[in-house]
Amino acid sequence: MKILYKIFSTPEETADGFAEEIISLIKTTGEKKKFVSIAISGGSTPKLFFSVLADKYSGAIDWTTVKLFWVDERCVPPDDSDSNYGMTVRILLSKINLPSENIFRMRGEDDPVKEAERYSDVISNHVNHKKDVPVFDIIILGMGEDGHTASIFPGDEKLFTDRKNCNVSVHPVTGQKRITITGKVINNARSVFFLITGSNKSNIVNEIYRNSEVSRMFPAAHVRLKNGKITWFLDYESGKFIV
Ligand code: 6PG
C-alpha cells in the first residue's frame, strides 16, 4: 500500500495544495469515467479547503461529473450548526454548479439506524463496485484529537470489520449519535486523503506515521487500503514530529 505525506507551512497553504490535488484528480478521473464519486468529511478542518474550492475552482471543472457523498453525519437536522451537510452547503455547495441530483446527503434528522440502512443502499446504488464492495474514487477524511476518523471512535474498531456500508456510532464525550461509513468502504477506495491541521494532532500523526504499537488504538491507523493510495495533507504544526 502506498502512503504519501505532504507537509505545508500553514493551514492556508495546506488547503490550497489540497484543493489543487483534488481538482486535478477529479479532472483526470472524469476523463476516464462517466462520473467521479467523492465522500467528504465534516468538522472544522475542511472549511478552509471548501472555501478555496468555492473561491478559486468553481469554474475549473465540470462539476456535473461529480457525485458527492458524506463519510459521516451528526444526527441533527440540516439547519443545525452541527450538521456536516449544512456546513458544506453554506461554504461550498451554494457557490458551485453541482446538480442537486448528484448530492447524496446523510439525513441526520431521521432515525439513525434506518438512515444508516438507507444510506448503505444509496451507496450500493450509486457507486461502482468491485466484488460487491463499493469503490469510491476519492474519500476525504479528517482525524479528531482522539484519533477518530469519519465517525469511527476509539473502541469502535468493529466498524472496520462491519459488513454493512454504513452504521451508527456515538460520540464518546458528547453522546451525540452519528452515521458513518464503515472501514470496509473506506479501505476499498481508490484514493483516501487525510486533511489535518493543528499541533493538537501532531502526536497522533507521529504515532501513525511510525506505525507504533500505540497507534493501533487510533481508528485513523486502521485505514489501510486494499489497492489504493493514502495521502496525508498536513500543515507544519500537525506534521512537525515527522519532518
Ligand atoms: C465529523 C467528522 C470527523 C472529523 C474529525 C476532525 O463530522 O466530526 O467528519 O471525523 O473529520 O473529527 O474534525 P476537526 O476538523 O473539527 O478537527
Image: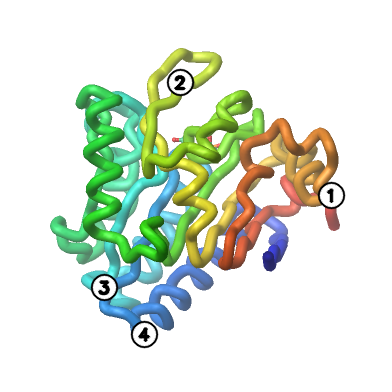
User: Which label is found at residue 210?
Assistant: 1
Taking the view exactly as shown, the residue that stands out farthest to the bottom is: 31
The answer to the question of whether label 2 and label 4 lie on touching residues, with beta carbons closer than 8 A, is no
Label 3 to label 4: alpha-carbon separation: 11 Å
The answer to the question of whether label 3 and label 4 lie on touching residues, with beta carbons closer than 8 A, is no
The residue at the point 31 percent across, 69 percent down is 58
The residue at the point 81 percent across, 47 percent down is 211
Q: Amino acid at mark 3?
A: Thr
Relative placement, left or right, of 160 versus 94 is right
Label 3 to label 2: alpha-carbon separation: 34 Å
Q: Is residue 24 above or below residue 120?
A: below
- In the image, 183 versus 145, the foreground residue is 183
Q: Kindly state the secondary structure of the residue where label 2 is placed.
A: strand
User: Which label is found at residue 32?
Assistant: 4
- In the image, 42 versus 225, the foreground residue is 225
Answer with mark 3 or mark 2, whichever residue precedes in sequence.
3
User: Mark 3 highlights which residue?
Assistant: 65
Answer with mark 2 or mark 4, whichever residue precedes in sequence.
4
Q: Amino acid at mark 2?
A: Val
User: Mark 2 highlights which residue?
Assistant: 170
Answer with mark 1 or mark 4, whichever residue precedes in sequence.
4
Label 2 to label 1: alpha-carbon separation: 29 Å
Q: Kindly state the secondary structure of the residue where label 4 is placed.
A: helix
The answer to the question of whether label 1 and label 3 lie on touching residues, with beta carbons closer than 8 A, is no
Q: Nearer the viewer, mark 1 or mark 3?
A: 1
Label 1 to label 3: alpha-carbon separation: 37 Å
